[in-house]
Amino acid sequence: MMDQIKHFFIALKQIVKGSRGYYIWIGILGFFMLLGWSTYVIQLKRGLIVTAMRDQVSWGFYLSNFTFLVGVAAAAVLLVIPAYIYNFKPIKEIVLFSEMLAIAAIFMCIMFIMVDLGRPDRVWHLFPFFGTMNFPSSLLAWDVLVLNGYLVLNIAVVFYVMYRIAHNMEYSMAVVKPLVILSIPWAISIHTVTAFLYNGLPARSFWNASILAPRFLASAFCSGPALMIIIFQVLRKISDLEIEDSAISKIAELIAYAMGFNLFLFGAEMFKEFYSGTAQLAPFQYLYFGLHGYHGLVPWLWTALIFNLIAFFLFLSPRARNNVVTLNMACVLVIIGVYIEKGMGLVVPGFIPGTLGEIYEYFPTHSEIFVSLGVWATGALLYTLMLKVAIPIYTGRLRFARGAATVGESAAIRGSVTSAEL
């Protein structure tokens, strides 16, 4: 036990060591965290009146970010399947870092839910055994269960694999594979249940479409892996982590398929609404052409659509996706495009026009933006600290043996399995 405690503190020491760039990055994150959480204290004192949310639009910027981040967390499965099911070695080498991103994303999702609560002191009502979850009738209860279950699964896989590698032991697929297989439908379920939270409101016609859950998943498999591609390239630059070009190329190829499907679903939805021309068309008119003189989101949604189309063609071309410049451009475009489309472009028009035909144009206040920046900075810090411990272990620079730990340049074996174990 004493050895384990000692190893734990040695691992923690990794987070205080770093280059000048590392300390600047931590300082920037610390600044935004301070800004965000100090603004949240004001929100706690004054209430949600400091936000732009009102009776007409009761879900806003916080839930927009929550919805986008659930997709980022679910997107880890796009790497898990080729890594563990098809044993594609280049992605298998880096899949743990995508699972860590999923952990950070779920923490951010939970924080965005917390800051969206007018009375966060009543959150204990959602805890099993302590509160009344109204399970299984409540979709919110399902969302709490799937999000926390996915978080536990990812933490278990990452911790187990890292622990075995740190102690110079091979990890067993007999342990990892059941957890990974379980995580695949679970990843799909977290975004499906989130879609059902919107989908299950019949008075909000914009969300009341059976195509919503598939669109959620398709867009998640575009923006999440695109974010991972950028992170992997940064890690390759600033650390000794080896990431093969074939891994990044394969992820980009998978994004192209997901984007094609996402745009197809978008086109199908547009055809149904505009060709039928029913009263349900009003939210779409507001989004893309404006409604009764209100057009606050129109430039944003056209920007998102153009970005997504450009990114799709860049990902579709093997030459473009194998070029660093065009690949990164495509990744940035699809992240921004999906962030707008599945954030403000999804949440706000669900309330416009309202059930009484009233139009209230929502745009987040500086309080909402600052608090959101604080949440993003907190999640980025969490991911950074996980990487700070994981990379030395993964590259063999940090190893634990009974009664001693070694920190150095010596390369050691990475966790791998034999074909017999598979």
Image (tube, grey):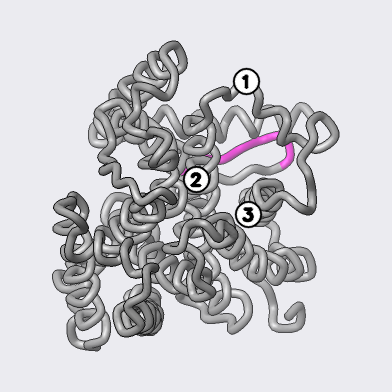
> Whole-percent x and y of residue 187?
60, 64
How much space separates mark 2 and mark 1, taking CA atoms? 23 Å
Name which residue type carries label 2. Ala
**Disc 1 marks which residue?**
121
For residue 69, side relative to residue 406 (left or right)? left
406 part of magenta stretch: yes
Residue mark closest to the camera, 2 vs 1: 1
Q: Is residue 321 left or right of residue 191?
A: left
Looking at the image, which residue is at 30% across and 79% down?
274
**Which element is circle 1 on?**
helix
Residue in the picture at 19% in, 55% down: 292
Q: What is the span of residues highlighted in magenta in the rendered image?
A: 402-408
> In the picture shown, does residue 273 fall above or below 111?
below
Query: What residue is pinned by disc 3?
Result: 154
Q: Earlier in the sequence, mark 3 or mark 1?
A: 1
Q: Are marks 2 and 1 in contact (CB under 8 Å)?
A: no
Quadrant assignment for the N terminus:
top right
Asked if labels 1 and 3 touch by Cβ distance under 8 angstroms, the answer is no
Secondary structure at badge 3 equals: helix
Tally the numbered discs: 3
Picture residue at 64% right of the left edge, 43% below the top: 400
Image x and y of residue 412, in percent: 54, 58
Q: Mark 2 points at which residue?
A: 104
Measured Cα–Cα span from mark 3 to mark 1: 28 Å
Q: Which of marks 2 and 3 is nearer the N terminus?
A: 2
The quadrant of the picture occupied by the C terminus is: bottom right
